[in-house]
Image (cartoon, rainbow, N blue to C red):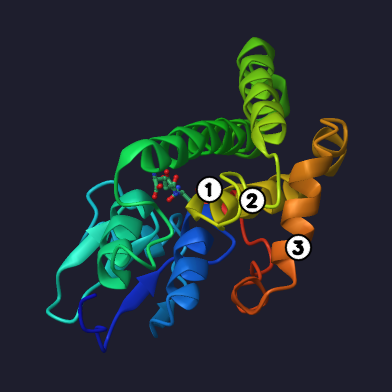
Amino acid sequence: MLPKPDNLVLYGRYASPFVRRVAVTLRLYGIEYLHTPLMPFGPDKVELARFNPIGRVPALRLDDGEMLIDSAAILDYLDGLAGPDRSLTPASGPARRRVLALLAVALGANEKLVAALYERHFRPREAWHQPWLAACDKQVRDGFTWLDAAHAGPWFTGAEMTQADITVAVFWLFGRAKRPRFFAGLGCGRLDNLAERLQTTAAFQATVPEPEMLTDQLI
Ligand SMILES: N[C@@H](CCC(=O)N[C@@H](CS)C(=O)NCC(=O)O)C(=O)O
């Protein structure tokens, strides 16, 4: 386990599920950080583009000024700080491959959820491309129902909580908040239970998403 850094700065609002999974992980590892809740739209995008050419969140500033971008790369760094015994992503072998496979499906489904939200938000309703929205919805549905079937409990991989549980719970809560009827219709009771259980923990309570700010002025 490496020494804990002193002055980490996490960029991005908890309203972004990619930011929130990083913030929850920081808290579970007991690593303190400052929080700069920049939006990846509007004027904040200029500031974000100073360290990420495509102006996305999350980003994590390290003690020496190095900037990490992308939630997976940031989690990889945090797992290294936690060390192999505490890492929420198993260090090697079949257990690691299983968690990475679960994460791949969760990240893909969540990206399609976000893509469809952007289509509905940023384009006028008459320009929405319905076949594209239907294709996104199918990937979201297929991804989350697959994850639901894969969750035997108490955790995805058995007795130990892993990054798969945290990330899926964060994404599920995000989806439920954004599209309540669609997510209720998926019938994913195991994911509902997982999210309800984690939602009451200190790390989730401390990272509740901020109120929605996505308005047309922010494009
Ligand atoms: N693969 C990235 C995805 C990050 C992402 O899509 N962030 C969104 C916020 S939820 C964003 O910055 N969107 C603005 C944009 O794509 O321009 C990660 O895991 O960090």
Q: Which residue is mark 3?
A: 197
Q: Which residue is mark 1?
A: 164
Q: Quadrant of residue 84?
A: bottom left
**Tag 1, which secondary structure?**
helix
Q: Which residue is mark 2?
A: 155
- How busy is the neighbourhood of tag 1: few (under 14 within 10 Å), some, or many (20 plus)? many
Label 2 to label 3, Cα distance in Å?
11 Å
Residue kind at label 2, given as amino acid type: Trp
Q: Residue furthest top?
A: 131
Q: Residue furthest bottom?
A: 6
At horizontal 60% and vertical 44% (from top left) the residue drawn is 156
At horizontal 79% and vertical 60% (from top left) the residue drawn is 196
Classify 42 as above or below 153. below
Residue kind at label 1, given as amino acid type: Ala
Label 3 to label 1, Cα distance in Å?
14 Å
Classify 67 as above or below 137. below
Residue 41 falls left or right of residue 158 = left
Label 2 to label 1, Cα distance in Å?
9 Å
- Please report contact status of discs 3 and 1: CB closer than 8 Å, yes or no: no
Residue 41, numbered circle:
none
Classify 13 as above or below 170. below
Relative to the observer, which residue lies in front, 84 or 42? 84
Could you tell which of marks 3 and 1 lies nearer the N-terminus?
A: 1
Relative to the observer, which residue lies in front, 9 or 27? 27
